[in-house]
Amino acid sequence: MSQVIKNTVNESIYDDTNRLNEEECFLSKVDLFARDRGINFEATPKVTRKPISLFELYKKVKKKGGYDAINNTENGWSDLAGEFRQLDPTRAPKSLQNLYFKNLIAWEMYDLWHLQSPPPQLLELSSNKNNILQRVKTYNLSPSYKSTDALEVADTKNSNSLKNFYKSIRPPSPVTLERRAEEALNSNYQPLPNAANFSNTTFPIVPVHPLPADSPLQRQVDRSSGPAISIEESLGQGIPGPPLLIRMALALKSRQEDEVDWAVCHLVKVSFERYQEFKLERLPFLAECLVEALGFQISLVKKVSNESDITQYLDRAIGIALVLRNSVLSSENAKLIAKAELIVGVLESAIRCAKTFENVELLHYCLDISETISSYLCIEDEKIGLYLLLCSFLNSSDNAVLIATLRTLARLALNDRNNRLLQDLDEKVVIRIISLTETNNEELVAATLDFLYQYTTYRTNTSGLLSNSAIWILVNQLTRLMMYQAQERVVTIAVANSGKADVQTPNTSQTTSFLPLPYSELQQLVLLREPERSVKWMRCCFESSPDDYVLQTDIWQMYCSDMERAQGPGLMAISPADFIKVSSHAFYNARAMTVSTPLLPVEYVINGIKRRELPISLIGEKYQVCRWKKDNGTLCGETVLGTKSTWAHLQEFHIFPQVLEEKHCRWGDCTYYIHSDQSGGSSVPSHQSLLKHILTHLYDNNLQSTTNEGRKLCPSREFRIPLLLTAVDEQGDATGIALTATLVLRNLVRSKQGKMLFSAIEGHVLEVSTMNPAVAPYVSEMLLGQI
């Protein structure tokens, strides 16, 4: 092949068909063409470990209309691979495409389409393999390109100058819009003092990409460049532009329809897919541009009368409002947008526009924005249009609108420094808000109570409510909601007896070690689902003890060990965190917390429980270990469930007539012995004495012992107290609707007329606080306020 190429160079650059056959001539031309472009040409490449002829590949692609025609056809490369026999149909299509793109794509542009190919780093070395023909045509038509004779491509001087020029420019990387948006979001640059002017050193390097095709801004750039400007004299050539989101902000600021549509389209996608990283503080003037763009589109809607124009401007306004709505989900973005100078006026105009044209989508987006940023807004005058507009929505029949309005007004009142808001509402509106507490919509009731809590912080409002007949409707609903969704819990209190029980207790020295849960119980636990399985296991192996605690790591390792014995390793159906959480379900007083121990300053423990010396079964019976000493001196060690089963086990396997004749107790280390009767009387009484003594070793403190008189003796008396507990947070403090209802009632009671109100409901409120300890601290504040 090298001798062929030398002969070809001496006679002609690309034409020599007399001495070579058709395929060799083709390969020589492509090889020379590739060398001029600085590409290593592979004459006989392999596709899925099989060699393939580039000449045949090029002929087939040319017959089908070229690379783009096959690439834009579904299964185009798969059908082409099928024409080559003995190729892997799964991997060959992709390999054929890569092979053609690397070796023949530039030759196709020259031979089939008579176009000048861009440099290799923009074509063969690029990873963007779509719309090649259109991109090369755009390259040939660009002002920076000077057409030359095809035979002059191999000229060394021009080739070297072209290569040196492209080496000085960073080639653009074909990154998708979403990927470039991600790079812009993850970039760490500081906003400029003057955001309209930026330099290459301020922003991270982003590959240069053209503006959207056929956009007015692109046409303006093309006209301004002109054909007379050379590559070296073009302003900004080779300098990376701003990040994608900055370009979007500039497009919004231009107010050109095509640019705005392009920016809104991509901002909606970015704000939805990457809302957590969509930080406006890192994007100079984008927040202001969004607010101004929304106001501008609303102003255009008011000016035009054509229905198609109204629809067009409304669609743009909805898109911009959606971007703002998605962005304010982050508290940092909400603070930034709340500081925008025009935000209050723009939201008012947008809401009025949505009401005028009955556009529900735009209305809800604007209400969501208002609700989120209201925590950071400070309304100093009750005559501001946005506040008055929100107050008018209190008569709305739409629950979604009503909920958003109540929350927004409540948050605005929270930042009311001048005490001007929520004091000019109509009496009928207030009565309607009170009636909303009777509904079954939990979200609506919660929003209503939040609003009433802020409403009752004003003395004038409280005085007006107490003088209104509707106050008793509100008070009845508040006392009812103080027990909202309360769940029944039973608390057991043990009171020690003053008398002493003459019942022999088991020797504590005999139970120094803990008995593991038997395998039979574990088999029953495996049949249960989590978290019920974990709760049952804890109750079998642990018991309540207010003064004790268990390390979280120890109890989790014990559970894993028992489950591995029952079902094998690696089959845990609950995570360690969830296992620790269910301890409060197994024992009411159990709490996961941290304590200081002699070993470590901080230990993660479960407080309020301790390990059982003898486990219990799922039905509550206690297991025991048979400690009967056999003839060989070893203990039996059999695990038996309950006292009756243990006694039956002793009678069946251990207490034989010879044992009774020995008159010696073999239980553990017991030294009990019955002396022989010297008078020669019957040994039956001695046998009975021995059996009674053996029974003392089988004492089960779960079973209540009785005296001969039938009176039950137990170490303590237990009282079960039923409680109704409402929602609490992680610290055990009240939360949710029950808490808010209690706070509203507290605001009413604290007023001047509140003593009369509290005297009427004192008994009922104290009863509620007794049944629901979560709200008891706030009821105590009501009582202290009456002193």
Image (cartoon, rainbow, N blue to C red):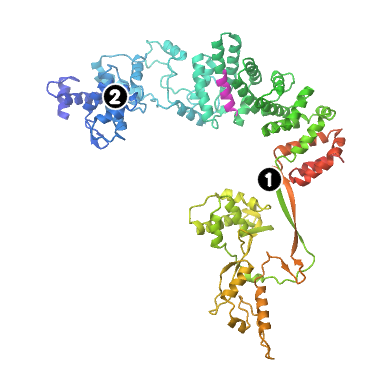
Which quadrant of the rendered structure holds the C terminus? top right
Compared to 747, does 118 lie above or below? above
Q: What x and y, as percent, mark residue 210?
A: 42, 20
Q: What x and y, as percent, mark residue 190?
A: 54, 28
Q: What x and y, as percent, mark residue 574?
A: 54, 49
| Residue for point 40% across, 16% down | 234
Compared to 10, does 553 lie above or below? below
**Proximity of marks 2 and 1: CB atoms separated by less than 8 Å:** no
322 in magenta: yes
Count neighbours of disc 1 (C-alpha within 10 A) and say few if under 14, some if 14 to 19, many if 20 or more: few
Which quadrant of the rendered structure holds the N terminus? top left
Count neighbours of disc 2 (C-alpha within 10 A) and say few if under 14, some if 14 to 19, many if 20 or more: many
In this orientation, does residue 692 appear?
A: yes
- Nearest the viewer among 428 and 272 is 428
| Residue for point 56% across, 63% down | 518
> Residue lying furthest top in this view?
305
Disc 2 residue type (three-letter): Ile
For the record, the magenta segment spans: 317-328
Disc 2 is placed on an element classified as helix
| Residue, disc 1 | 731
Disc 1 residue type (three-letter): Gln
| Residue, disc 2 | 105
- Nearest the viewer among 167 and 344 is 344
Apparent side of residue 36 relative to residue 724 in the rendered image (left or right): left
Viewer-side label of 2, 1: 1
> Residue lying furthest bottom in this view?
679
Quadrant of the rendered image containing residue 91: top left
Compared to 613, does 726 lie above or below? above
